[in-house]
Amino acid sequence: MAKAPKRMINAQDLYQIMVLEDPRWDPTGEEVAFVQLKADRAKNDYTRTIWRWRNGWEAPLQFTNGGKMDFLPRYSPGGEHMAFISTRGGKPQIYLIRLDGGEAQQLTNMPNGASGFSWSPDGRQIAFVSPLNADERRLEKRGKFPPSPPMDELEGNLRKLEQEHQEKQREDPRVYRGLPFKAGTEFVSDRYDHLFLLDVEDKKSRPRRLTDGDVDFSTPHWSPNGKYLWSSSVRRPTQDRYAESDIVRITLQDGTVKRLERPGYYGMSPKPSPDGRLVAAITMLDLSHFGHIPRLTVFRTSGTGWRDLNLEFDRSVGAHNYKYQFYWAADSQGLYCTMEDQGYSQVFYVSLDTGEFTQVCGSQELIQAFAVNQKGDLAYVSRSATHPPELYV
């Protein structure tokens, strides 16, 4: 049978191109979950669905089909469940589903939605981010926010209409006491991202807020002993969402926020090592946001012994969807990261002992996101000028 003649790509072909995101290993290191983003031609919109691939399977299998956006798949430490974020109910909320099947259960009902989250080491709790403004935080302290779930669909629809009306009334006129007051085409919100703690096993419990103030906190990461959360927040509470940030450590028992400052630098994206002795993060010079490479930095949990790993290598740590791509090795003796070079990005391993960078995979391609399991196997999404994103192991 003769091959079809080659032709130029056209606009309709874009509906056939799928984007892959956020690969994640399960605790056994035998299975990978990832997100597939594709255009929905009928709805003139995009959808995200979660897929799974396992050793021995001929092809990946679709795992969720919420009809909207399902993303951020995270296996539970025990490997029996997966938590993810979905907009199937309107606002993005955290859902839980068993890996052996069944309906997804909604875990959060935050009026302003939920975002970046992570499991506790024992699998009993989830820490996540949700935005609140000053009025909502005051009502929450009095036990009046968030409201209890609606009794039926009619009450839910009425609440939605009332909330939309209140939002319009509240935002006209707008009062700003800082700069910038606008980002792109949208006004800067008066809601700030705060950290919450959710008891997964107690279905009746409400999430407990850990942070306060007019300041944003980033996606939390648990310490191996389950006593602390690592995050970052703006150095000076302000409406300037782009000000310098510092790494913070939150004690779960009493909510104490300890700011770990590196003089002359600002920091973000802290991730503790599996043995709990060190923390890896991204730091940058205070002098300017431009003209300096992001530094892959390790330091002691006490906030001392700061050490930059990639200065001699002179390459930037890669980022995907505004998230820097680096992970600890299982033995805590090194880090895996993507490094950018001449328009491409590859995965490297850096030894803490020698400081040497060793290329693990990649050539003339763009490795956007990756994950590494306990055995050192990599799952990564790669694309180039001649092929769309694909998942590799």
Image (cartoon, rainbow, N blue to C red):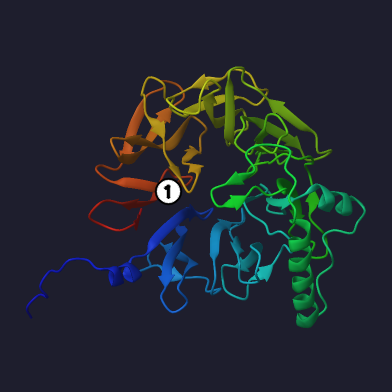
**Relative height, residue 289 to residue 151 (above, below):** above
Q: Is residue 5 above or below residue 248?
A: below
Total numbered badges shown on the rendered structure: 1
Direction front: furthest residue: 173
Callout 1 crowding tier (Cα within 10 Å): few <14, some 14–19, many ≥20: many
Judged left or right of residue 176, residue 31 is left
Q: Where is residue 137 in the image (x, y as percent from the top left)?
A: 83, 49
Mark 1 highlights which residue? Answer: 369
Q: Nearer the viewer, residue 39 or 280?
A: 39
State the residue at coordinates (51%, 34%): 331
Specify the farthest residue to the right.
142
Image-based side of 238 in relation to 77, left or right: right
Q: Nearer the viewer, residue 57 or 215?
A: 215
Q: Which amino acid does label 1 sit on?
A: Ala
Q: Position of residue 341 (x, y in %)?
A: 31, 34
Residue at image point 54% right, 48% down = 184
Which picture quadrant has residue 212?
top right
- Residue drawn at x 33%, y 51% is 382
Q: Tell me the quadrant of the picture where the N terminus can be found.
A: bottom left
Visible residue check, residue 55: no
Q: Position of residue 386 (x, y in %)?
A: 22, 55
Report the side of 106 relative to 149 (left or right).
left
Report whether residue 118 is seen.
yes
- 384 vs 295: above or below: below
- The residue at the point 81 percent across, 74 percent down is 150
Q: Is mark 1 on a helix, strand or loop?
A: strand
Residue 223: give x, y in percent of width and height.
Answer: 66, 38
State the residue in front, 32 or 1: 1
Front in this rendered view, residue 162 or 60: 162
Position of residue 305 in the picture relative to residue 167 (left or right): left
